[in-house]
Image (cartoon, rainbow, N blue to C red):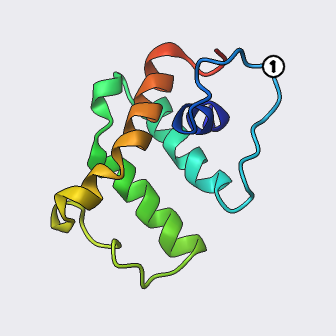
Amino acid sequence: MADAIYRYANGQAFERWDGQLSNISALERPLYRMYALLALSAIDADDIGMEDIHNAWSIWCASFLTTEHRSLKPFKELSPEVQELDGLYLRATQYVCMFGWNR
């Protein structure tokens, strides 16, 4: 499921999946697994919001990159431009939640 979210976010969602994992880096894989967890735990794709995506990113960033990133703050405190950066990952996660992961 993490792989499907990665493929969608990187413009590969509509390519026929050949069963091979995408080239998600070892550093990024935990982030996409957190997005997959959001998709798995949602009853409906609309249950996943931008704040959820940001929170997953924040946990990943603080765990694997830095605790000093300027966007490590509550979602509502981010500028609209920075908030919108989570939109692609929200759409990818919702897509996989709605349509399945082995397309």
* Image x and y of residue 1, in percent: 62, 31
Position of residue 90 relative to residue 40, above or below, is: below
Circle count:
1
* Image x and y of residue 2, in percent: 62, 38
Identify the residue shown where x is 74% and y is 58%: 26
Residue 26 located left or right of residue 70: right
Position of residue 45 relative to residue 81, above or below, is: above
Secondary element at image label 1: loop
Position of residue 36 relative to residue 56, above or below, is: above
Residue 31 lies in what quarter of the image?
bottom right
* Image x and y of residue 4, in percent: 62, 30
Residue 84 located left or right of residue 76: right
Which amino acid does the dot numbered 1 rest on? Answer: Asp
Crowding at dot 1, Cα within 10 Å, few <14 / some 14-19 / many 20+, comes out as few
Task: Name the residue tied to disc 1.
Answer: 18
Identify the residue shown where x is 18% and y is 64%: 79
* Image x and y of residue 21, in percent: 78, 35
Query: Which residue, as the protein is rendered here, is positioned at the far bottom?
Result: 68
Which quadrant of the rendered structure holds the C terminus?
Answer: top right
Identify the residue shown where x is 35% and y is 52%: 85
Residue 80 lies in what quarter of the image?
bottom left
Residue 5 lies in what quarter of the image?
top right
